[in-house]
Amino acid sequence: MSDDFFSLQRDGAVAHLQLNRPERMNTMTPAFFPALRDAVRGLQDDAQTRALVISSTGRHFSAGMALEVFGASSEGSALQQMLDTRSPRARLSFQESLRRLIDCFSALDEARFPVICAVQGGCIGGALDLATACDMRVCSADAFFTVQEIHIGMMADLGVLQRLAKIVPQGVARQMAYTGERVDAKRALETGLVNAVLADHGAVLEHALGLARQIAAKSPLAVAGSKMALNLARDHGTASALQQMTLLQSAIFDTTEMAEAIAAWKDKREGEFAPLAPIPRI
């Protein structure tokens, strides 16, 4: 099923997931979400991946959720049943279905490895939910970002409202959410939505993969711990995050890992680090 939406390749410790429906502007159907979640969790479980790049093909990164899934042609489909809010029971089911969709993007945020999103052209609607669940974003000069949902009479509901304001200033996030305006690459860089703007799609992908290789050369234990600590600091108060930091560091502190990192730095070579332990399937 994942082949219908994206390809997944691995070069050493760097994985590359590439959306591959350019003829449909890489739009997302309901089946896309669990396919993405399962792919990311599979990479996490086997513990061989130390960084993941998400990119796409064609003119635009992604136009988000395919609008036809909201139409009458989907009558009787699983999504149409999910969107049925005519009764309290149906609304409770809707709530659980939405939570499961949200969890599919949260898999990126929760992964033990950093995720880099490489954007060209439009990053629209649900695509921005995906991008903001990644650790970092880089884009091409022609890229733009928009909270498209407001234009079709709904609030964005897959995580962008919760994550965007922790990436860009509150006022910028609110303006994007309330107006659905397009934020171009220059403005995205100014506000911190992206880390870098490159000339074109090829340059963006090269930059993202280079950054991923740089991360993958570091101790995966230290990188995973750093991501956990940064996420805790983002989602909790400073005092709570610092307390969690003492527990986290005492759990993963490894003098052998440090000795290898220091030796590699002195010898001007890449460190040799064991992968993280696989996560058993239960």
Image: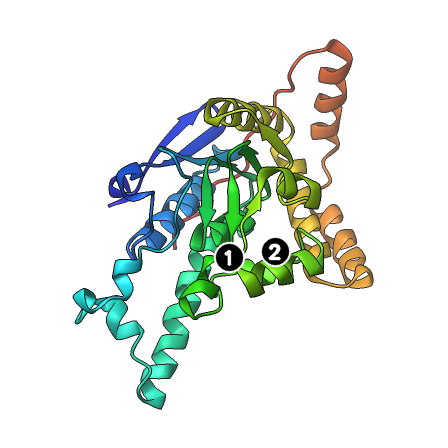
Judge from the rendering whether residue 199 lies leftward or rightward of residue 219; answer left or right. Answer: left
Identify the residue at horizontal 44%, vertical 70% (top origin). 154
Label 1 Cα crowd, 10 Å radius (few <14 / some 14-19 / many 20+): many
Q: Is residue 277 above or below residue 165?
A: above
Closer to us: 272 or 103 = 103
Q: Residue furthest top?
A: 267
Q: Quadrant of residue 237?
A: bottom right
- Residue extending farthest right: 239
Q: For residue 181, which quarter of the picture?
A: bottom right
Q: Which residue is mark 2?
A: 164
Q: Position of residue 41 (x, y in %)?
A: 43, 47
Q: Nearer the viewer, residue 26 or 143?
A: 143
The residue singled out by tag 1 in the image is 147
Left or right position of 188 against 108: right
The mark total stands at 2
In the rendering, at what x and y percent does residue 225 appear?
A: 66, 44
Sequence order check, earlier mark of 2 and 1: 1
Q: Going 62% across and 43% down the picture, which residue do you hit? A: 188
Task: Label 2: state its secondary structure.
Answer: helix
The residue at the point 76 percent across, 52 percent down is 245
Dot 2 and dot 1 residues touching (CB under 8 Å): yes
Going by the numbered disc 1, the residue's amino acid type is Val
Q: Pointer 2: residues within 10 angstroms few (<14), some, or many (20+)?
A: many
Q: Tag 2: residue type?
A: Leu
